[in-house]
């Protein structure tokens, strides 16, 4: 894979001067990234290569659209081929630039491949998918449960591919693992604390559910009240996720599809709530990764082994103050590191600034959590209010039932885990999310002044790291007095 690394460092400005050379370059990088032996390479290097290739794609796209070489206007077919091979989502401003370089038919086809339904081209509607977005956020309840959105048959409109579908350049089959960087900034605190290095904050799984004779390709994910299906196009959209990689169980074969789909439907109905213990054998409460383990095991596939651990002594001590002692931690990266899974594709929503901001903040948060003493006495008043409410809901008091009616919880679907942790998790995520937003702005400003910024230079940029360190000033994680 080192050759891929070197090829990314070549001058983009020089490479895009010849369309054939540019297309060959993009194809070679794609092939080498796909062929990477991830378990042998190790999590840290795979994460670096992931970020490096995302940054590289965004820079190539920038060169092709904002400073288009002469051939881009005279040979739109080759430009279309390169943009299709890059397979990176176009922002509205980039769509406008692209429309000026391609024919209407070529532009419509490119949009369809990105999950955008082009007007006046019904022949591309299967390729583009449903073309409907819903206000659903990862891990949080929404006003769009399955029983509501399944009434719209357009959510079943995809290009068939085997037992699954082809969408946004990727073939999805039942049981596929989606390792996702979701756009809930601050989400994934635990993954940033575990070893080996975190690859993504969330994992979910592809399945096909049926209702009233229609088949709906969905992503099965945990959220605060259990397990739910999210429309495939919504989960993969730029509002929901910034980046997703798809991994397939190597033992999967066509007969597994129906079983996996049936089990997925059963999980949606029977899983009561979220579980902070990813190693718990009780299938009625699940973490995001446990869904995949139970799913594959029930279907007769070898389940993924736990490779990660909340290992550092100070991290364990601080988490213990919140009652959290589940230190064997089945993390999303473990799917990538298990030999029984192989890379099957990626969805790049062109949000490198958000990905880098999260990475920088996660690294600094981990550093502070390893060096400082957590002080629960410094949590804000909402924490105390949350603990009080959780206590009443656990005991099913009159007050607890009233709170549950408002929040959608009862004593049976409350997440399984320590109440001290439950009481503070959203508060902490909001504080950390604000730091990520500030860091993202700083990254945008830094990148705007560089034609071809290097990942290592960005991650080690003193000014960016200073912004993160100053902003991540959490009252409940105070600096050491000495």
Image (cartoon, rainbow, N blue to C red):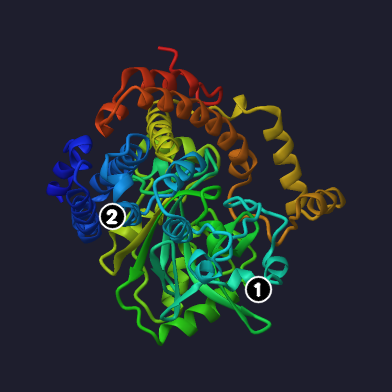
Residue 95 visible, this angle: yes
Residue 153: image tag: 1
> Would you identify the image quadrant in which residue 216 lies?
bottom right
The spot of residue 225 in percent (x, y) is 65, 58
Q: Position of residue 319 (x, y in %)?
A: 48, 39
**In this orientation, which residue lies closer to the viewer: 208 or 107?**
107
Q: Quadrant of residue 14?
A: top left
**Side (left or right) of 150 relative to 88:** right
Image quarter where the C terminus lies is top left
In the image, residue 51 sits, relative to residue 396, either above or below, namely: above
Q: Residue at x 48, y 83 (%)?
A: 259
Pick whichever, 196 or 400, lies toward us.
Answer: 196
Q: Residue furthest top?
A: 482
Q: Crowding at label 2, few (<14), some or many (≥20) Cα neighbours within 10 Å? A: some
Q: Which residue is mark 2?
A: 78
User: Disc 1 and disc 2: Cα gap in Å?
Assistant: 36 Å
For the point 41% across and 58% down, which residue is it?
Answer: 106
Q: Residue furthest right?
A: 398
In the drawing, what numbered circle is on residue 6? none
Disc 1 element? helix
Q: Position of residue 392 (x, y in %)?
A: 78, 48
Crowding at label 1, few (<14), some or many (≥20) Cα neighbours within 10 Å? Answer: some
Q: Is residue 123 above or below residue 144?
A: below
Asked if residue 265 lies left or right of residue 459, the reply is: right
Callout count: 2
Q: Position of residue 110 (x, y in %)?
A: 43, 57
Secondary structure under badge 2?
Answer: helix
Q: Of 2 and 379, which appears nearest the observer?
A: 2
Of labels 1 and 2, earlier in sequence is 2
Q: Is residue 196 visible?
A: no
For image coordinates 20% across by 41% down, the residue present is: 17
**Closer-to-camera residue (344/476):** 344
């Amino acid at each position: 894979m080192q050759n891929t690394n070197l090829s990314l460092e070549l001058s983009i400005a020089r490479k895009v001067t010849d369309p054939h050379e540019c297309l060959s370059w993009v194809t070679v990088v794609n092939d080498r990234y796909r062929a990477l032996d991830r378990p042998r390479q190790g999590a840290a290097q795979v994460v670096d290569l992931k970020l490096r290739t995302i940054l590289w794609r965004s820079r190539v796209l920038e060169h092709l659209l904002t400073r288009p070489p002469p051939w881009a206007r005279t040979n739109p077919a080759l430009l279309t081929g390169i943009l299709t091979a890059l397979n990176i989502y176009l922002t509205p401003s980039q769509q406008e630039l692209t429309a000026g370089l391609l024919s209407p038919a070529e532009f419509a086809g490119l949009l369809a491949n990105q999950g955008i339904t082009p007007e006046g081209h019904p022949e591309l509607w299967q390729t583009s998918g449903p073309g409907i977005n819903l206000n659903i956020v990862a891990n949080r309840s929404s006003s769009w449960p399955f029983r509501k959105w399944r009434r719209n048959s357009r959510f079943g409109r995809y290009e068939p591919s085997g037992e699954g579908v082809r969408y946004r350049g990727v073939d999805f089959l039942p049981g596929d693992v989606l390792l996702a960087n979701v756009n809930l900034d601050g989400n994934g605190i635990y993954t940033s604390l575990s070893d080996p290095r975190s690859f993504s904050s969330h994992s979910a799984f592809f399945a096909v559910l049926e209702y009233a004779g229609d088949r709906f390709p969905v992503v099965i994910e945990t959220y605060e009240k259990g397990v739910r299906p999210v429309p495939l196009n919504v989960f993969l959209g730029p509002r929901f996720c910034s980046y997703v990689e798809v991994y397939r169980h190597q033992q999967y074969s066509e007969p597994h599809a129906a079983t996996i789909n049936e089990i997925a439907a059963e999980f949606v109905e029977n899983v009561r709530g979220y579980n902070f213990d990813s190693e718990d054998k009780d299938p009625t409460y699940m973490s995001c990764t446990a869904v995949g383990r139970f799913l594959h095991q029930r279907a007769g596939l070898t389940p993924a082994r736990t490779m990660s651990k909340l290992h550092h002594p100070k991290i364990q001590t601080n988490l213990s103050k919140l009652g959290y002692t589940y230190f064997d931690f089945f993390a999303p990266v473990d799917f990538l590191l298990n030999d029984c899974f192989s890379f099957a594709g990626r969805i790049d929503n062109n949000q490198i600034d958000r990905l880098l901001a999260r990475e920088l903040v996660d690294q600094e948060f981990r550093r502070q959590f390893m060096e400082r003493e957590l002080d629960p006495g410094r949590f804000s008043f909402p924490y105390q209010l949350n603990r009080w409410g959780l206590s009443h809901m656990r005991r099913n008091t009159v007050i607890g039932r009233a709170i549950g009616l408002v929040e959608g919880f009862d004593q049976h679907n409350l997440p399984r885990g320590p109440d001290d942790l439950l009481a503070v998790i959203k508060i902490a995520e909001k504080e950390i999310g604000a730091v990520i937003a500030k860091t993202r702005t700083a990254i945008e400003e830094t990148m705007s002044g560089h034609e071809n910024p290097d990942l290592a230079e960005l991650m080690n940029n003193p000014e960016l790291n200073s912004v993160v360190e100053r902003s991540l000033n959490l009252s409940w994680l105070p600096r050491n007095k000495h």
